Image (cartoon, rainbow, N blue to C red):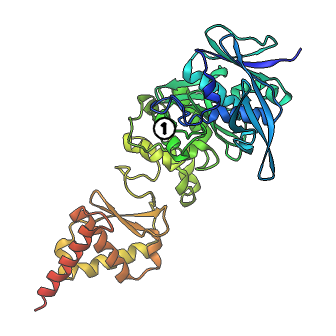
Amino acid sequence: MKKYLRIQSNGIIEKEALTLIGASTKRDSKTAIGYYGSGLCYSASSLLRNNIELKIFAGTKEIELSTRPVNFRGNDFEVILVDGEETSLTTTMGGASWDEPFAPIREIYSNALDEDSEATLKITENVCGTFGKTSFFIELTDDVNHFVENIGLYFCNQNKEVLYANNWGAIYANNEETTTRLFRKNILCHKNSNESSLFNYNSSHFKINESRVLENIFDAKYYLGTLWKTCQNESMIRLLIDGLSGGNYGQLEHDIDYGNWRDSWSIAWYNVASKFKFVPAEIVNFCEEHELKGRIVLPAKLLKPLYQKWNDLDVLGYSETGTGIDFIIKENPSPLLTNKVVDAISILSKTRYNHRLNDIDIAYVNFASDTILGYAENNKIYLSTKLDTWSVHEVAKIIIEENEHNITKFSDETREFQNHLFSLYFEELLTQK
């Protein structure tokens, strides 16, 4: 006997849902999707087009679907009939993107869930309606059966392996090495077979379009960052750290927005992170082998906001505030560089700038960025070890710039700092009269 996938929910469907595009009752709903009412029509069209039998019952009464051929301007079409009445719908609706069984099943099940959060999926041979309920019966072809056997990949409420959940979403195990899956309200809304992820995720905060597909991956990464920041489970945090260690790309989680402003880090993060030593992947190439020993390499996207929350964490290369430039302090700079710095300060001390030199504290560093030669923070000047190839006069200019940053507290490349330097220059011109 032929088998069917039955999707059933409370309430009675009206046959106009299959004939009127734009008549959706969800238009003013902030939670339901299907504003234009086209999804169900596309579902029926795609199933009929692919010769997959579809039966619909409104309570105990069947809404009969059939087709008849028509010719329009030399092209043949199959017009859909509902209870024998011709509609303006054809079996070409939806296009190729609806030909995979998941698309129509997702739409029908999603509509059912919108009406009834307890809507059910069941394999059955008994095709009949149920009083007070709407029932869809989809022929269990090989493709539909394959979908059912792997239903947890499409509807995560059928997957019982929830690893962690909070108000921002739920985290599931991911057994696919090269695929990322995101779910919204338990329904797959994003699949990327060219990107791996440590976990799969379900969140009601993800935004989807009318086709129930994720609207913006960057927006989703924002909510995923919040989900992880607020995680209270130390074992899950350790799994994430272990999974990301070694680099700053390769997994979806490497590129999550951990630095967003919404909600603060849970104390569970500090409990885990305070037990380890870290180094940002972005500066590993600037470190010597002994500096990396015993440190976990993690992406700066995760480490920097975490360090900004708790700057007593051991993160190599971050300044005291955690908000500045990434660098590695070098304890033994070349004598050539230190001699040039001594000469530069000596030159400045013999000029009218001498009164602005007050116990300059200098450290020598390797900056993560090749373009940075100097940096000022907390009354300290950090000079790049690359300056050993620069002239003494050029080194002196860099010391002046960083010293003025410390004095004024104005940021680099700002109008305030530019105006300050012009004022100093103008005042110096006036003294030459």
Total marks shown come to 1
Residue 100 visible here: no
* 316 horizontally vs 343: left or right: right
SS state under label 1: helix
**Which quarter shows the N terminus?**
top right
- Residue 414 or 238: which is nearer the viewer? 414
Residue under the image location 16 percent in, 74 percent down = 355
Extreme residue in the right direction = 1
**Which quarter shows the C terminus?**
bottom left
* 15 horizontally vs 432: left or right: right
Picture coordinates of residue 204, whole percent (x, y):
51, 30
Picture coordinates of residue 90, whole percent (x, y):
73, 39
Picture coordinates of residue 154, whole percent (x, y):
68, 30
Q: Is residue 425 above or below residue 361?
A: below
Extreme residue in the top direction = 131
Residue 430 visible here: yes
When asked about the image quadrant of residue 405, the answer is bottom left
Question: Which class describes the residues within 10 Å of circle 1: few (<14), some (14-19), or many (20+)?
Answer: many
Picture coordinates of residue 240, whole percent (x, y):
57, 35
- Residue 406 or 191: which is nearer the viewer? 191
- Residue 298 or 294: which is nearer the viewer? 298
* 254 horizontally vs 273: left or right: right
- Residue 367 or 371: which is nearer the viewer? 371
Q: Which residue is mark 1?
A: 223
> At label 1, which amino acid type do we have?
Tyr
When asked about the image quadrant of residue 2, the answer is top right
Residue under the image location 25 percent in, 63 percent down = 410
* 431 horizontally vs 159: left or right: left
Extreme residue in the bottom direction = 433
